Amino acid sequence: MRMNGRDPLPMRAWTLLAGLAAFISASGCAAVREGPAAGQEVVFFPAPASISAAGEWSLTIQGRIFEPAGQSAGRQAVITLAARTLAPLLGVSPADAEQSDRFRERAGLLLSDSAGNTRVSVQLGEAPIALPASDPAGYFTADLTLSAAQVAALTRAGSISFASLPNGANGKVFAGQVMPLAEEGVIVVSDVDDTIKVTNIRQQREKLENTLLKPFAAVPGMAELYRSWQAAFGPGMHFHIVSAGPWQLYEPLRRFTEDAAFPPFTWSMRSLDIGSPAAILAALATDARDYKRQAIRALMTRFPKRHVVLVGDSGEQDPEVYADIVDEFMDRVDAVFIRNVSGEGCSAERYRKLFADEGASKLSVFVDPGELPPLAPASPGRALCAGRH
């Protein structure tokens, strides 16, 4: 298959990267290891906390444990080989040191050595807590129960901070945070690629360039739009990313959202074992619809009194995912905003099929965020697509 007259480079490129990663993957170990080991690092991903009807809080601690690629001569050799073979296919000139360095950095994140079956302990207040062992991608998650009094005592400026416990092998301390959310309010569920970050995901070569080579760039007007909603709703609004991208890219994405002045996010991304070619190719061969739908459904189930605003783009399957959520949670979805990157306006057959009757009254398809109706606590405003299909 060819796309826009070009070879299917991305599939070949990712297949190559997957094979290289597998070549230097460490073999698994049946026994749970205590981490972080020497040279390993831990990244915690911000997650929301919810309160139950009984007044108890459920706190999610999630993160990834890994060895940076820079710690391994073998992985550095793989990245150098990838820079010599893959980067030139994307148009990287050896003379462009900045772009070459960026490629090496992001390839290094993707090729970092996941520490599977490894347990991290954290200090939360006065209590040391051993978290569950990580999966093959190094990802771990735990739901902890705290009393209202404990949460009140630990919360500072809207978040609860905690840190990993050092051990004899690794004296580093890695910090994380959890964000307690009130029972009622609005959660903005946001996609990343082509929703808040320019990726051009429908153009396969540009997708790779914008992922591996170029500085991350914000979609014009989206940070301002989100900040205007935050100003209108105050602490009653929370922003949550649901992305099908791998956790390995969380750190540069987090820095991007901060540098672009987006409001703080909590995050849901996919756990993907980069060292497994089968896992990578399976992810490439399937769409993200099931993952995103399950992640949003879990969020809405966890916060049953909160409404949501769904923000995505038309480049892949955000409209299909969001239509499923509207069908299931009609009364709790206040608005659906779809950035038009595919040339499909409100009257497109795609939207007529997905958003019928009441669903159409929630849908706005836009190119410029300035087109969107105002969003305020009293009303989501009249949807751009209401009555148009």
Image (cartoon, rainbow, N blue to C red):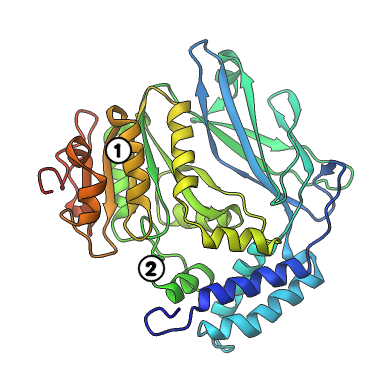
Comes first in the chain, label 1 or label 2: 2
- The relative height of residue 270 versus residue 94 in the rendered view (above or below) is above
Q: Dot 1, how many residues are within 10 Å of its Cα: few (below 14), some (14-19), or many (20+)?
A: few
- The relative height of residue 107 versus residue 138 in the rendered view (above or below) is below
**Which residue corresponds to the image point at 83% horizontal and 48% vertical from the top-left?**
170
Task: Name the foreground residue: 166 vs 186.
Answer: 186
Tag 1 secondary structure: helix
Residue 202, position in %: x, y? 38, 68
- The relative height of residue 155 versus residue 61 in the rendered view (above or below) is above
Residue 30, quarter of the rendered image: top right
Q: Dot 2, how many residues are within 10 Å of its Cα: few (below 14), some (14-19), or many (20+)?
A: some
**Which residue corresponds to the image point at 78% horizontal and 63% vertical from the top-left?**
25
Residue 103, position in %: x, y? 58, 74
Compute the Cα span from label 1 to label 2: 33 Å
Task: Name the foreground residue: 170 vs 373.
Answer: 373
Residue type pointed to by label 1: Ala
The reply to whether callout 1 and callout 2 are in contact (CB within 8 Å) is no
Task: Name the foreground residue: 276 vs 137.
Answer: 276
Residue type pointed to by label 2: Arg
Q: Nearer the viewer, mark 1 or mark 2?
A: 2
Task: Name the foreground residue: 304 vs 229.
Answer: 304
Q: Is residue 207 found left or right of 363 in the rendered image?
A: right
> Residue 202, labelled with which disc?
2
Tag 2 secondary structure: loop
> Residue 251, labelled with which disc?
none
Q: Which residue is mark 1?
A: 231
Residue 101, position in %: x, y? 60, 75
Q: Is residue 308 found left or right of 14 in the rendered image?
A: left
